[in-house]
Image (cartoon, rainbow, N blue to C red):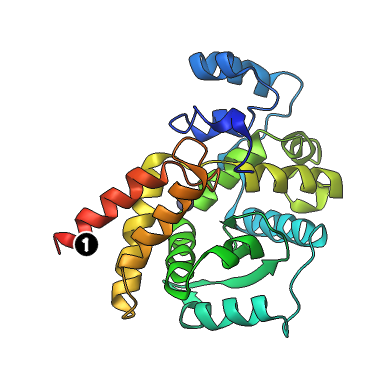
Amino acid sequence: MFEKPRFKTINHLAFACLITVSSVSLVGCKTAGVNMDGMLSAGMGLVSAASLSDEDMKQIGDKSIAQLDSAQSIAPPNNPYAQRLARLAAPWSEVDGYSLEYKVYLDPTVNAFAVPNGSIRFYSGLLDEMTDDEVRYVIAHEIGHVVLGHSKGRFQTAIMASSARQAIAASGNSTAAALTSSQLGELGEKLVNAQYSQRNENEADDFALNLMIQYGFNPEASVTALRKLESKFGNQSSLFSSHPAPGARAQRLESQIANR
Ligand SMILES: [Zn+2]
């Protein structure tokens, strides 16, 4: 989660490094991809990300999000949080051929994330902090991660770095049926806590800005949303572990809006 201080100084590192930071020393993680390679190959199956078909990915994604949801208190449809998110996300039930599905976790954590199957989850803590247009920006940003394939890449990396990899290899095929609930839980946790690269963040921000403008929402909300995160959490420990350096991103978006 965002509050973990160990993520503070490693925002720029590759995602593959970050998602296993709990089991690799920071120094080793920071300085040597070799450590990662050794760790990944030791005792693990030989399945590769490339061997997973889109259908496999979808199945594993569906199961992972179901497992994550089952561990959370989900806002029921008549809950004000659920109704607000449903209202704000209403224009974007499908974007660029991706069907999107939204739920709120009743949890004070300030976070949101997306899974490549189009599942987007908001924590109620984030909804408490943001105006409607700011929430729209976060929704649009998460959609960007799905549509631009970032979410898929992150998910593939999470699979490779989890015990699910071994189970998939051992099953003789690469279907989600091989995964136990604890493996899916581990995978889901890696997914929620993982970071995107700064480049992916910028791409998702650009996507969000365009979507906001296209739909007639105030693009300045992207800047104020990020400024809020900056003032609340600072730039080192970002509001979202998966969304580093809010101050720099706010500045970047601000100049893009000014130059339009
Ligand atoms: Zn992001």
Q: Residue at x 44, y 61 (%)?
A: 147
For the C terminus, give its image quadrant: bottom left
Q: Which residue is mark 1?
A: 257
Vertical order, 238 against 229 (above or below)? above
The answer to whether residue 118 is seen in the rendering is no
For the N terminus, give its image quadrant: top right
Locate residue 192, reporting x and y percent: 64, 48
Q: Is residue 49 left or right of residue 59?
A: left
Locate residue 38, reporting x and y percent: 63, 16
Q: Secondary structure at mark 1?
A: helix
Quarter holding residue 212: bottom left
User: Which of the pair 205/155 is nearer the observer?
Assistant: 205
Q: Residue at x 50, y 28 (%)?
A: 10
| Mark 1 residue type | Ile
Vertical order, 56 against 86 (above or below)? above
Crowding around mark 1 (Cα neighbors within 10 Å: few <14, some 14 to 19, many 20+) is: some
Quarter holding residue 219: bottom left
Locate residue 80, reporting x and y percent: 67, 81
Q: Is residue 232 left or right of residue 65?
A: left
Q: Residue furthest left?
A: 259
User: Which of the pair 186/131 is nearer the observer?
Assistant: 131
